[in-house]
């Protein structure tokens, strides 16, 4: 029950919004879906106002016809609950259920995601529309999967949020004394003497409390998860055979801890929107795919959305060159997605996303885009064989939502830290060396890995520190970089050398943080260079691998160290290395794989997936993959 019912092999399709189009178009849609080999579409994501035009009055006629038509056409439905976009009647009747920003601004309807997940009226209305859908469609033969909500991510700072937050804090800390201790309440007179004094971290005069802010992120993730679970449970009850999921997305605005959520979904679904048109897009896509597979515990997952024809960059949409849609899809498929889905099936005629690309462009089927869609759809059924084969790797990168959240607020850090860039850097350098890495949470199971890399894992809980100690003592090779273990789970400093208290394991103490000016580098002896951040390290038994060649205070001081510990070894990189320096370190650790820069190579059982993003032919062993091409072959041995 972890795969859309009735979909054989790989999924191909996207978000389908028939409610935006006259019914004459629907027949054309189904015919074109058949032509393209589409077998799954997501319906109803934002159709609450069409399904429930007035409070408690439902109109399912159009959806009945859509479900029947798709079913007869052989296209299965991933049916969404529409709770990401409450209709205008709802917000007017329940103004307290609107999203409140930190500055107190209440976001009115007129866009989407204008809800407060903590508001009882919103929770009731969500469950009502979800249970109406469950009752009506749970047994529909076209129903393949439930898609709860869309990209959970709205954070509200309302009075409802604050009430719920206090309850969450009481359950977590038990007493105000514990909370005041954890939040370091003596600072700036922030001691609370009554639970009711605790607010959401709203706009305040100057810096806010980092422990308070981090707990609010964790609380928001849990509250959104509660909203998901409530819908899931009633959908499950209506028909236990249908898998249920929601689509994850990757953005600083999405306060969701996917490690925690993963246990509650039947299938990990991910929306991948790279943000840069150069080769960063391929790097980001590969990282999204490896994260998704890791959240899925190595099981198949599903690329639920991607843009067909363009990349959303800060400069606006940039067209994907011919073949790039297929190559991006193949990055995900090679790394474990059992299919390629898109936002969206047909480009809209109106509304704020009317210029968003789609499988069927405004100009219709006689277009280059649709021809590419049909060609790729023809190729997909042939790729089903390797789809269940696991991807084996003994290299993992720590992914810590706490560290991401805690470093998003630059104000309470020793210097600007771009956590995501630090993680992405490790992933891209490994990928360029042909290594496919898993991600793992700092408290997660590390027993399958020989090498674990902890890039600037700023927040290191006691449990995570013990986990790393256990991993290293047992024979693992840990490579941690600057600021790892700077603070604990309450954002309190790990005293006497930082490093999550693992100074004995690393055989060093970090005694000073030395942020460096932007644009300047600090050379390391025979090792490339560092930029932006260096630390002063005192050796306490570790061996110095290389030293800083330049820089005030740090000159001739240890930059990279290694310490044998138990059966394993703990490496420490006390600065932000440039890519070439990481490459050199990984070379010395013999971390290499079959891929090349710009060429993804993933081995899965007997299958080899190769995607060549370069404009030159790629030769991988005996296999030659043309420029811009991809290939899935059986390996000779
Ligand atoms: C996604 C969202 C879709 C659509 C898309 C546009 O994040 O789930 O509904 O808005 O972005 O790229």
Image (cartoon, rainbow, N blue to C red):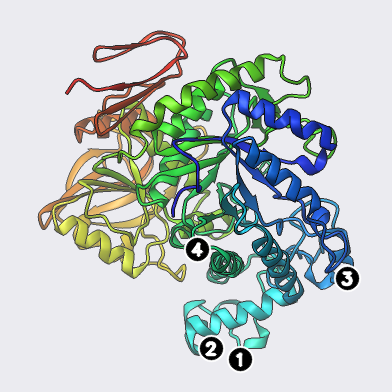
Question: Please, what secondary structure does the residue beneath circle 2 have?
Answer: helix
In front: label 2 or label 3: 3
Q: Describe residue 94's horizontal placement relative to residue 460 as left or right.
A: right
Q: Describe residue 104's horizontal placement relative to residue 72 as left or right.
A: right
Of residues 2 and 63, the one drawn nearer to the viewer in this rendering = 63
- Residue named by callout 1: 193
Question: Please, what secondary structure does the residue beneath circle 4 have?
Answer: loop
Q: CA distance from mark 3 to mark 1?
A: 36 Å
Quadrant of the rendering where the C terminus is positioned: top left
Q: Is residue 520 visible?
A: no
**Which residue occupies 40% across, 28% down?**
383
In front: label 2 or label 4: 4
Q: CA distance from mark 2 to mark 4?
A: 42 Å
Question: Please, what secondary structure does the residue beneath circle 3 have?
Answer: helix
Mark 3 touches mark 1? (CB < 8 Å): no
Checking the image for residue 176, the label placed there is: 2
Query: Earlier along the polypeptide chain: callout 3 or callout 1?
Result: 3
Checking the image for residue 93, the label placed there is: 3
Residue 273, image x and y in percent? Answer: 59, 37
Question: Please, what secondary structure does the residue beneath circle 1 have?
Answer: loop
Mark 2 touches mark 1? (CB < 8 Å): yes
Query: Earlier along the polypeptide chain: callout 4 or callout 3?
Result: 3
Q: CA distance from mark 4 to mark 3?
A: 34 Å
Of residues 395 and 511, the one drawn nearer to the viewer in this rendering = 395
Checking the image for residue 240, the label placed there is: 4
């Amino acid at each position: 029950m972890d795969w859309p019912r009735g979909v054989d092999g790989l999924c191909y399709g996207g978000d389908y919004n028939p409610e935006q189009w006259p019914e004459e178009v629907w027949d054309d849609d189904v015919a074109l879906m058949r032509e393209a080999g589409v077998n799954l579409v997501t319906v109803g994501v934002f159709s609450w106002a069409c399904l429930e035009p007035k409070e408690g009055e439902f109109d399912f006629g159009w959806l009945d016809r859509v479900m029947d038509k798709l079913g007869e056409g052989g296209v299965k439905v991933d049916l969404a609950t529409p709770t990401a976009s409450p209709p205008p009647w709802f917000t007017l009747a329940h103004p307290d259920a609107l999203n409140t920003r930190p500055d107190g601004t209440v976001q009115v309807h007129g866009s989407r995601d204008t809800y407060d997940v903590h508001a009882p009226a919103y929770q009731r209305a969500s469950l009502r529309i979800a249970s109406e859908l469950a009752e009506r469609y749970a047994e529909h033969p076209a129903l393949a999967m439930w898609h709860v909500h869309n990209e959970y991510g709205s954070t509200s700072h309302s009075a409802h949020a604050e009430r719920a937050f206090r309850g969450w804090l009481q359950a977590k800390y038990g007493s105000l004394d514990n909370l005041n201790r954890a939040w370091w309440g003596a600072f700036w007179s922030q001691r609370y003497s009554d639970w009711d004094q605790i607010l959401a971290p709203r706009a305040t005069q100057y810096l806010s409390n980092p422990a308070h802010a981090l707990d609010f992120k964790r609380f928001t993730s849990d509250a959104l998860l509660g909203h998901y679970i409530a819908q899931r449970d009633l959908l499950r009850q209506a028909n236990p055979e249908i898998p249920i999921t929601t689509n994850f997305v990757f953005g600083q605005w999405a306060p969701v801890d996917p490690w925690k959520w993963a246990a509650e979904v039947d299938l990990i679904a991910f929306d991948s929107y790279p943000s840069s048109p150069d080769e960063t897009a391929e790097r980001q896509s590969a990282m999204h795919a490896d994260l998704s597979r890791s959240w899925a515990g190595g099981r198949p997952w599903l690329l639920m959305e991607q843009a067909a024809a363009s990349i959303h960059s800060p400069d606006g949409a940039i067209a994907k060159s011919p073949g790039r849609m297929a190559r991006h899809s193949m990055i995900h498929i090679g790394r474990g997605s059992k299919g390629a889905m898109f936002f969206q099936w047909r480009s809209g005629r109106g509304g704020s996303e009317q210029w968003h690309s789609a499988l069927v462009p405004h100009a219709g089927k006689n277009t280059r885009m649709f021809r590419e869609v049909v060609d790729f759809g023809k190729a997909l059924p042939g790729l089903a064989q390797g789809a269940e084969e696991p991807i084996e790797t003994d290299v993992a990168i720590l992914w810590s939502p706490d560290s991401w959240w805690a470093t998003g607020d630059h104000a309470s850090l020793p210097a600007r830290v771009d956590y995501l860039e630090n993680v992405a850097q490790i992933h891209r350098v490994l990928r360029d060396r042909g290594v496919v890495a898993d991600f793992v949470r700092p408290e997660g199971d590390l027993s399958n890995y020989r090498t674990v890399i902890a890039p600037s894992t700023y927040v290191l809980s006691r449990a995570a520190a013990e986990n790393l100690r256990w991993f290293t003592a047992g024979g693992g090779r840990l490579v941690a970089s600057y600021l790892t273990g700077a603070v604990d789970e309450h954002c309190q400093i790990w005293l006497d050398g930082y490093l999550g208290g693992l100074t004995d394991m690393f055989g060093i103490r970090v005694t000073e943080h030395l942020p460096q000016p932007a644009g300047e580098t600090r050379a390391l002896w025979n090792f490339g260079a560092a930029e932006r951040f260096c630390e002063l390290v005192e050796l306490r038994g570790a061996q110095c691998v290389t030293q800083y060649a330049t820089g005030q205070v740090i000159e001739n001081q240890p930059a990279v160290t290694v310490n044998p510990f138990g059966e394993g070894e703990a490496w420490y990189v006390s600065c932000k290395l440039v890519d070439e320096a990481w490459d050199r370190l990984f070379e010395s650790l013999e971390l290499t794989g079959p891929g090349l820069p710009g060429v993804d190579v993933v081995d899965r059982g007997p299958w080899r997936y190769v995607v060549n993003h370069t404009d030159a032919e790629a030769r991988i062993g005996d296999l030659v993959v043309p420029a811009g091409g991809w290939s899935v072959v059986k390996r000779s041995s």
